[in-house]
Image (spheres, rainbow, N blue to C red):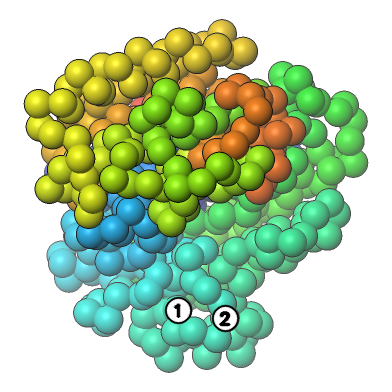
Amino acid sequence: MTPSRARRTIVVGLDCAPPRLLFDRFASAMPTLRRLRAMGSWGVLRSVVPPITVPAWACATTGRDAGELGLYGFRNRAPASYGMRTATSADVDAPHVWDRVVARGERAAALFVPPSYPSRAEASTRLVEVSCMLTPGADVVHTWPPALGAELAARFGPYVPDLERTLEGEAAMDALFAMARQHFDIAEHVLATHDPRLAFLVEIGTDRLNHLFWPLLDPSDPRHVPEHPIARMACDYYGYLDLRIERLIERSGPDTNLIVMSDHGARPLLGGVHVNELLRREGLLVLRRSPREDEPLTPELVDWSRTKAWSDGGYYARVFLNVRDREPEGLVSLDEREPLLARIDALLREVPDPSGRGHSVVRPREAFRQVRGRAPDLLVFFGDLALRSLGAVGARDIVVGPDVVERDGGRGGCNHDWEGAYVAAGPDWPRRGERPRELATLLADL
Ligand SMILES: [Zn+2]
């Protein structure tokens, strides 16, 4: 590691912020970011496998890949069960970049960085932490030290970990502004009171914005509506984030490294693939009864004694084989595994692809240095992330358009994309101009 010349490094994570908004569509509203780009390095930040918030930030902050962490999504297989459970901070057993700073005897702050709920009880007095969007509400302990939560609430109101999911339209935009204001107020307060060597914050609102409104923001989206008032508000929102980044720099002083980065990007959602329905029609997934139309697949619905493969939906499909001695009612033998995977691989590649980008089917050993936890047997990126994977059964069509996807999985709006973005400037980030970097290694020297 090269010794740092900066007194402090501030990392501002803008979840899901893509190059086309930061460097193009909204660049005129972000004078601070333009200045930082001219001073340092910037460009596309290639995300990790899978490009999903919880594993992506965990990989960025630990330098491990998702297989090494055994963290494959927002939800992961529960042990000894066919069910899934939501990720927690305990799912990351490698040191984060701020743990390394604290171990060197310096102070650090980790604010709203997924996955950081629950806040870790063993944390050092040199670390200040506020839990991320996984925090179930303002009334649970969500800070380290625990008493900090009440102090922050007295100053900045009840903690808002995430955007209220029922909000839409201009009310959602107002709430995004309010959430960013509170998060940056907390960050400024922690800078002033804790004086950390490293301050790392993640704003989740940029991700929520894309999922709510992407077709209004991106002219390349087939569902684009030009000149929509929400697009103007979204541009103002990016302008507000830029202003708050400027204020962080002012309060921190000139010998500060400032890194703005996203964990993945966003791209138009072109449709979805009913992967479980496909497996069901192939006889690989067997149900206990006929499904209702578009019925979510639950473990209770499946006849596991006759099922060889099933999938979990989302931005990518995780296909699991029902392996003997691994799954509770596994029936696929060791010898049967490879031919079965080859058969499913071929089946998935034949799914019609309206995006024309091609489906990518990956084995965990190809994607990861190590494969821990309950890894999927296949990772499938339909249309190379243009199409969502849909878990419901009883669907009429295997491939459906974006409007059906939004009915199946809640918010559609955009799909995640491989290309995130970064800007880095300061004493340790001399002027290098535009150069692509990798999410997995950007923070290696901190
Ligand atoms: Zn994200």
The residue identified by callout 2 is: 138
Give SS at disc 1. loop
Quadrant of res 60: top left
Q: Which mark is residue 142?
A: 1
Residue 313 screen position, x and y as percent: 48, 40
Say which quadrant the N terminus sits in: top left
Q: Mark 1 belongs to which amino acid? A: His
Residue 11 screen position, x and y as percent: 43, 52
Residue 328 screen position, x and y as percent: 22, 54
- Label 1: how many Cα within 10 Å (few below 14, some 14–19, many 20+): many
Residue most toward the left?
335
Give SS at disc 2. loop
Quadrant of res 129: bottom left
- Side (left or right) of 93 relative to 199: left
Residue in the picture at 21% in, 24% down: 366
Label 2 to label 1: alpha-carbon separation: 8 Å
Residue in the picture at 83% in, 60% down: 171
Q: Is residue 90 above or below residue 356?
A: below
